[in-house]
């Protein structure tokens, strides 16, 4: 995935806006998918699964504790494998399901970045 100069915001390359994508998740289109190279996990809010009508029976329980910047643990539900399509490329990715209120519908962290061999910054 690349961007041209005409797609830059008004502040140019000095902006610090988050990178959001629109992806196909299972059979639905999902907007506000955050790409976050500082996250060690792919995150799926429980509310996103509910909106996509993905059965919570697909969630596998385990003892992982997900911690945020505040150092506190988050309400962890389990993990789930979800099929994504981004452009012509399909992925099956593991997501940590959290029962939290966030500004994104899915978060693609380093597991997704490494799988895709994406370079998350123009600094590379």
Image (tube, rainbow, N blue to C red):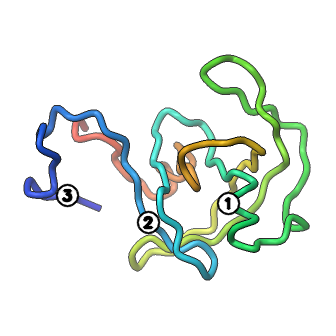
Q: CA distance from mark 1 to mark 3?
A: 28 Å
Q: Secondary structure at mark 1?
A: helix
Does residue 16 sit above or below 25 in this rendering? above
Task: Determine the residue positioned at 76% across, 65% down.
Answer: 50
Nearest to N terminus: mark 2 or mark 1: 2
Label 3–label 2 contact, CB within 8 A: no
Q: Secondary structure at mark 2?
A: strand
Does residue 58 sit above or below 96 in this rendering? below
Q: Which mark is residue 3?
A: 3
Which residue is the extreme one toward the top? 71
The x and y percentages for residue 99 are: 78, 45
Quadrant containing the C terminus is top left
Instruction: Compare residues 45 and 4 and report the one nearer the observer.
Output: 45
Q: Which mark is residue 22?
A: 2
Residue pointed to by mark 1: 48
Does residue 51 sit above or below 11 in this rendering? below
Residue 49: quarter of image: bottom right
Q: Secondary structure at mark 3?
A: loop
Quadrant containing the N terminus is bottom left
């Amino acid at each position: 995935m690349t961007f041209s100069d005409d797609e830059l915001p008004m502040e140019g390359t000095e902006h610090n806006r988050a990178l959001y994508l629109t992806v196909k998740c299972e059979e639905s289109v999902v907007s506000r998918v955050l790409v976050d190279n500082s996250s060690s996990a792919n995150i799926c809010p429980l509310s996103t699964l509910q909106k996509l009508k993905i059965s919570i029976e697909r969630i596998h329980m385990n003892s992982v504790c997900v911690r945020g910047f505040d150092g506190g643990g988050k309400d962890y539900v389990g993990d789930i494998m979800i099929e994504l399509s981004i452009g012509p490329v399909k992925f099956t990715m593991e997501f940590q399901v959290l029962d939290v209120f966030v500004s994104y519908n899915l978060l693609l962290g380093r597991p997704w970045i490494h799988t895709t061999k994406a370079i998350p910054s123009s600094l590379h």
